[in-house]
Image: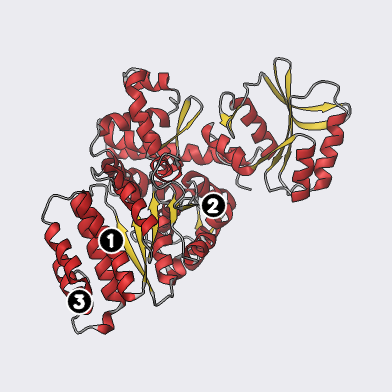
Amino acid sequence: MIDTQTPVTGDEFFNRSEILERLLSTGRNYALIGLRKSGKTSILYEFEKRLKKPDTIPVHIYLLFSETERSFLTKYAAAVLYSYLEQNSGSGSATLEPRENLNDLIVKTIERLPALASDLIAVLNELDKKPDIGIASRILDLPYLLSKHTGNTLIIILDEFQVVQNFNIDMIDLLRQKIQTQRGAYYVVAGSAVGMMQGILTSSASPLFGHFEILSVGSFNYNWSRCFITTHLDKSELVIGDKLLNFLIASSGGFPYYLAVLVDRIIEYCHTVSIKQVNQKAIIHAFDRELLNTSGKIFVYFTDSLENTFQRRNIGFHIEILKSIAIGSTKQSQIAKYTTKTPQELSRPLRFLEQAGFVTRNGVEYFITDPMLKTWLSVAYPLQMELSFIKDGKRLDAFDRKIEEMITTYRGELGKGSESRVRELFRDFGGLELRHTKLPKFTEVEQRVIDGNEFDIVARYGEHYWIAEVKSGNITAADVNKFVKKLDKINFVIDSALIIALAGIDTKAQRIAEENNIQVWDRDGVNFLMKLCGKFPILV
């Protein structure tokens, strides 16, 4: 069985070595930004586990969506003192229990550090009062005071850091003051509300601008997703064909939590029916139990996540907006028609959904960021929560047919080949933006032979032409030079020449492309557009 309820560490920890190396270098403030279930908390736990510095004390504080100023400050003070006492548990006579209350922690800390008595008693007395900036400042001083009197360095880990924006006390500016004026404490913050976190840390108007090095935490790439799935299946002596394996990766977006939950359910199914080869029924069963069933882990995760995010807002209205986007109403006018609201009424909730990381805006269109959430919103949620007149058996049959259609569609996509799939993308991406450039709506996209030379893509709108070469293998300087020679023989004006580098491009080849005004699109850029156009990604 795969542990899908707690962050993974040790042998179960996958990938993320570059991020861990950066964190373990310490001496800086870091921020981990990534969507929910991308593995940030697992990285933080593994970081603590690997932090082998006796004079460095990690303090992990997880902020709940429902956190208040008082609960946060109490939790902060208790976590700092508990971590200090636990690190130095051999230096005192009192036994430290796993769940000490703050009063006991303060008493035990004073026993070991009498010099902090007045500061800690003041903290204890003030927590009964209504929290204000002064009280918050004194509590945030605790890491500095401990460092000053012990010589230890404290690393304060604040998980789901964006929650502090909900407080009346300006914790963000207060933290800036501590970072600028105090030594002996560093901060590692993490957050899943990508837009909010970027606003807090990368906006030049934010007090914390420039104080944190940003580490982006995304989903697993194809190779690590494949490794994750096959490693766990191998342990259970199961095998899976490439097409079904790739479907799991594409439909989950490579998010480790979804992969873990689905693979765990697949293993259970295969053992129950005594098969060694994962088949389509096993995949559909996993989606049934985890995405459609109201007690499924993914179903519960989505409902809890939405309820926690929208607890101070109209949850029903926000879910209606998300559903409309999931089924294809991507423009504000279309969303307004679906929700029977005016476009003006949608501006604020759409901005909030974007900040919270649920939707991505591209130009004037909105898209569900997480592909698994999109499937849940468009298929599972309506069947389970809204269409109450459908009996359970028929509801399950309807869901199974949808997942079967997804698998069939994916198999069909794989059979087309990369060049054909990119041509289809060129036919559909009009109006979207890539790297802040609006893409045209082509009236003609085809493979064409010009003066004896074959071109993968010749796309036209009006009298404007884009010419593109699609390569599934790594692109070398020779490949680019060959493309340049072919372009030189074309007797009409080319507006844009592109190389679609699905497997990468050499440094020299990249330089030659730049010298000849040839754009290079990598697989990530192509898959970004594929996702927005509702297509499965190109994985290999």
Pointer 1 or 3: first along the chain: 3
Instruction: Pinpoint residue 481: horizontal percent, then vertical percent.
Output: 84, 41
The span from disc 2 to disc 3 (Cα, nearest Å) is 60 Å
Q: Which residue in the structure is indicated by mark 2?
A: 245
Instruction: Pinpoint residue 316: horizontal percent, then vertical percent.
Output: 26, 31
- In the rendered structure, the answer to whether residue 140 lies left or right of residue 246 reads left
Badge 3 element = helix
Q: Residue at x 46, y 65 (%)?
A: 26
Q: In the rendered image, is residue 300 in sight?
A: no
Dot 2, crowdedness within 10 Å: few (<14), some or many (≥20)? Answer: some
Q: Quadrant of the N terminus?
A: bottom left
Pointer 1 or 2: first along the chain: 1
Dot 3, crowdedness within 10 Å: few (<14), some or many (≥20)? Answer: few
Q: Who is closer to the viewer here, 401 or 85?
A: 85
Q: Who is closer to the viewer here, 214 or 425?
A: 214
Q: Residue at x 25, y 30 (%)?
A: 389
User: What amino acid is labelled 2 in the image?
Assistant: Leu
User: What amino acid is labelled 1 in the image?
Assistant: Asp
The mark found on residue 114 in the picture is 3
Pointer 2 or 3: first along the chain: 3
Q: Which residue in the structure is indicated by mark 1?
A: 141
